[in-house]
Image (cartoon, rainbow, N blue to C red):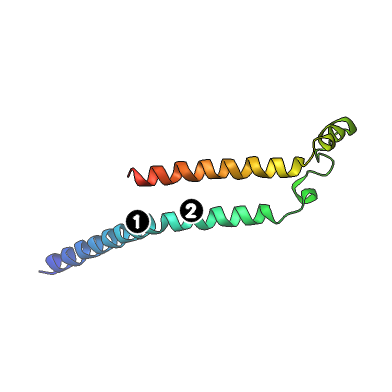
Amino acid sequence: MWDTIQQFFSDFIVFLDWGIEVMKEFFLILIQPVIWFFNLAKGFFSVVFKTAEELGFENEVAEFSENALAFFDVIPYFNYIILGIGALLWLVFLDFFIKKLGSM
């Protein structure tokens, strides 16, 4: 009789351990996307708020030559042209996105 009781509790402990492992794995699968998002956000914000010197870009800042700057200074309203091109591209992508959502 003692062997039967001992076997029952041994099996119960093994089953309980298995159940806890399955629940732990299930919980980790459920929260995995949340972990990914927070790791991405943490990495993004830790890099975004660093200065160029902290990132190792001390002398590698792009500087245009005087000839290039003179070329762009000759074009009247160059900043507004670039702004218009950017706004137009944004509208094209927005239109594409809305059409894709409408086709779903």
| 2 or 1: tag closer to the N-terminus | 1
Left or right: 32 in relation to 26: right
**Residue drawn 23% across the image and 61% down it:** 15
Q: Position of residue 65 (x, y in %)?
A: 87, 33
Q: Residue at x 77, y 45 (%)?
A: 56
| Residue situated furthest left in the rendering | 1
Residue placed at 67% from the left, 52% from the top? 47
| Location of residue 28 (image quadrant) | bottom left
Q: Nearer the viewer, residue 11 or 27?
A: 27
Residue at (48, 53) in percent of width and height: 36
Residue 64 lies, in percent from the top left, at: 84, 35
Residue 94 - label: none
Q: Amino acid at mark 1?
A: Glu
Label placed on residue 36: 2
Question: Marks 2 and 1, Cα distance to the nearest angstrom?
Answer: 16 Å
* Residue 44, x across and y down, in percent: 61, 53
Residue nearer the viewer, 86 or 60: 86
Q: Secondary structure at mark 1?
A: helix
> Pointer 1: residues within 10 angstroms few (<14), some, or many (20+)?
few
Q: Quadrant of the N terminus?
A: bottom left
Name the foreground residue: 40 vs 73.
73
Q: Is residue 75 left or right of residue 29?
A: right
Q: Are marks 2 and 1 in contact (CB under 8 Å)?
A: no
Q: Secondary structure at mark 2?
A: helix
Q: Choose mark 2 or mark 1, whichever is in front.
A: 2
> Extreme front residue here?
76
Q: Amino acid at mark 2?
A: Trp
Residue 25 is tagged as 1
50 left or right of 44 in image: right
